Amino acid sequence: MNKLYLTVVTIAIGLFSCQSDRATGPTDLAKNSIIPKPVSVTSTGGTFKLTAKSDIIVMPGSPEEVAGIGNFLAGKLNPSTGLGLGVITDGGKPGKGDIQFAISDTDPGLGEEGYELIITEKLITLTAVKPAGLFRGIQTIRQLLPPEIESDTVQPGPWIIPTGTIRDWPEYGHRGEMLDVVRHFFGPEDVKRFIDHLALYKMNVLHLHLSDDQGWRIEIKSWPNLTAHGGKTEVGGGEGGFFTQEEYSDIVQYAAERYITIIPEIDMPGHTNAALSSYPELNPDGKAKEPYTGINVGFSSLDTRSEITYKFVDDVVREIAALTPGQYFHIGGDESHSTKIDDYIYFVNRVQDIVESHGKSVTGWDEIAHATLKPDAVVQYWARAANAVMGINQGAKVLMSPCKYAYTDMKYDSTTVLGLSWAAYIEVDDAYNWDPATLVPEIGRENIVGVQAPLWAETISTFREAEFLIFPRLPGYAEIGWTPAGMRSWDEYRVRLAAHGKRIETLGIGFYRSPLVEWDQPGV
Ligand code: IFG
């Protein structure tokens, strides 16, 4: 009898303590694993719980788009909690367990994308100056809930968040990734999934590399052969592909709903074999180039002294600019080894005028600093700091994409199958352990608009392979762009990153389990 009694009591205590642990959940908001690390967190030691009575309350008089942000959050919380949160916009009073959104200009220090999150036992109040700040704040709410919140099937819960206050805003205004859809084509669904990943980590720019030697990826109605012919190839001889203008606009819209700006890149005058292969008249000898499916660079060039080249560029820029709400148009400009420097400078100067004539500002790889840059030009530093400094000396700003730290097509180490290694092996700590504002002495904080991590696609042909290269380095780039450098350290970050393993896995991402991180394992 005694033994049985003891067993029953033990089981009861176990159940009770397990339930009570789960019933109370974490109570120290300061011990969170949010990435990017928030600027300030104050814990008040209690717990907030989402229940079947919870709803998302949009304060009366909020801009129309705030309800959309509420629907986005409900769309992330309801499938995994099964709680059926509604979005209430009719001025209903918030009640226990509700999440309320408010737009207010009483806290201008939060800026365009900052937010304040006040969590009490009764209520979560998310306040921002602009809707973009609310959208960044709901990513924090997602990350304060257990990783199972990212599941698309109902999980047991409970859904508990520790109480306190978070005030948060980004260090840099440009925080992004580049996706090369040319060397291997990635369709609209892959690009949207990439945008989802950027949104979770508060990134706000997706640069799409749309043309190169191996393919042309966006429909240009006035030059249809660019996709009819140039869209049919890719590295290794695959079928390639391209975005119709409708698909491109759909991607732009999808990104905008997540407060992410698309920057389209048409790389020129180099990296243009696909265009030269599509139209004989673009070639000095009037003969179309053969399609190219290798991975060499620097062998192609538009004919910088032929007027049809500038008609071509004008048509291409006009059509894409008309579909692009963002301010910047990327003209490429890298590795134009087959273009004489004087011709290159002449070309870049004329193309800058074309881009501006269509209402856009110019950005380009750091080589464009050899030309006379427009005042609002942004030079994307990737390989030669001297070029970026030349840009600064002309008054341009710099976007930091240093190939030895931010090129996510670089292998993690010598054992990584995917990726290249010409710049460096970039382990997860290497990707995190750099400060854009001090990396190059002549490039100061005041010169830098932000950080961007390019993913070139020579060696990846599926989006799952792309995810292996971007995760787990992407969260680190997001933190470099968002969190002040003085608040960042690898030893502290790697502990938060470890807690994202299950979250990333729940999102269906097959990521590189770096041995430098003690990943949280399912069930631990
Ligand atoms: N450099 C080329 C890319 C790509 C890359 C692969 C730039 C700006 C090497 N240009 O990076 O097209 O081939 O790592």
Image (spheres, rainbow, N blue to C red):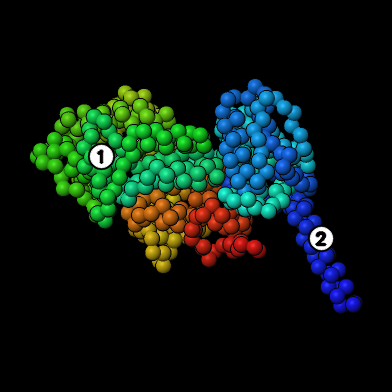
Say how many tags the image has. Answer: 2
Give the SS element for disc 2.
Answer: helix
Q: Which residue is mark 1?
A: 227
Residue 116 rendering spot, x and y as whole percentages = 67, 36
Dot label at residue 16:
2
Query: In terms of depth relative to the viewer, which is nearer, 376 or 464?
Result: 464
Neighbour tally class for label 1: few under 14, some 14-19, many 20 plus, Cα within 10 Å = many
Q: Amino acid at mark 2?
A: Phe
Can see residue 223?
Answer: yes
Q: Residue furthest front?
A: 1
Q: Is residue 220 above or below residue 148?
A: above
Q: Earlier in the sequence, mark 1 or mark 2?
A: 2
Q: Position of residue 466 (x, y in %)?
A: 42, 53
Label 1 near ligand 1 (CB < 8 Å) = no
Name the residue rendered at 25%, 39% in the picture. Answer: 227
Dot 1 amino acid type: Thr
State the residue in front, 238 or 210.
238
Cα separation, mark 1 vs mark 2, equals: 64 Å
